[in-house]
Amino acid sequence: MDYNELADKFPFLSCVKHGTNEYVGIIQNQDDFVTSIYVYDDIPSDKLKADFLRLGDVWWWESNRVIPINIFLAGEFSQYQNWLKTFTTKDIKMIFGPTTSLGNIIRKRIKRRQIQLVKKTDD
């Protein structure tokens, strides 16, 4: 299956290249310094791989895609923690797929209100 077919069939999968190796999986988090990805090929059994793809599909269609999969499906997805790889962001190249970042959740717009107290005098 080539990259276009893979991206069409499983839109939640991403591919990163680190050195000469390519890793396909679901990005847990990417910021300016590190990128973490659950690597599909490292998952040992076909049953776990099928469940991984099912959970990825649930996350993709039932979340707003801003929340990382490990937070959105915390209880169900914790079994895949062993296959999480972390890379320095500057050392990888994104080939295809979406990324999520906790930094996007934390950023909020805060409106500042200015309150001026005026002392009322009885003159």
Image (cartoon, rainbow, N blue to C red):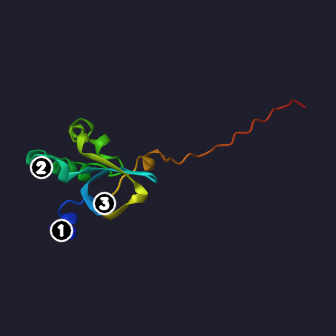
Of the image marks 1 and 2, the number of the one nearer the N terminus: 1
Q: Which mark is residue 16?
A: 3
Indicate the quadrant containing the C terminus: top left, top right, bottom left or bottom right.
top right
- Residue in front for this viewpoint, 98 or 83: 83
Q: Residue furthest left?
A: 46
Image position of 1 with respect to 100: above or below: below
Amino acid at the residue labelled 2: Ala
User: Helix, strand or loop at disc 3?
Assistant: strand
Mark 2: give few (<14), some (14-19) or many (20+) Cα within 10 Å. few
Image coords of residue 15 (percent x, y): 27, 60
Mark 3 and mark 2 residues within 8 Å of each other at the beta carbon: no
- Residue beneath label 2, please? 50
Mark 1 and mark 2 residues within 8 Å of each other at the beta carbon: no
Measured in 3D between alpha carbons, the distance from the residue under mark 3 to the one under mark 1, in whole angstroms, is 16 Å
Amino acid at the residue labelled 3: Val
**Which quadrant holds residue 80?**
top left
User: Helix, strand or loop at disc 2?
Assistant: helix
Q: Nearer the viewer, mark 3 or mark 2?
A: 3
- Residue beneath label 1, please? 5
Image position of 82 with respect to 99: above or below: above
Inspect this view and state whether residue 12 appears.
no
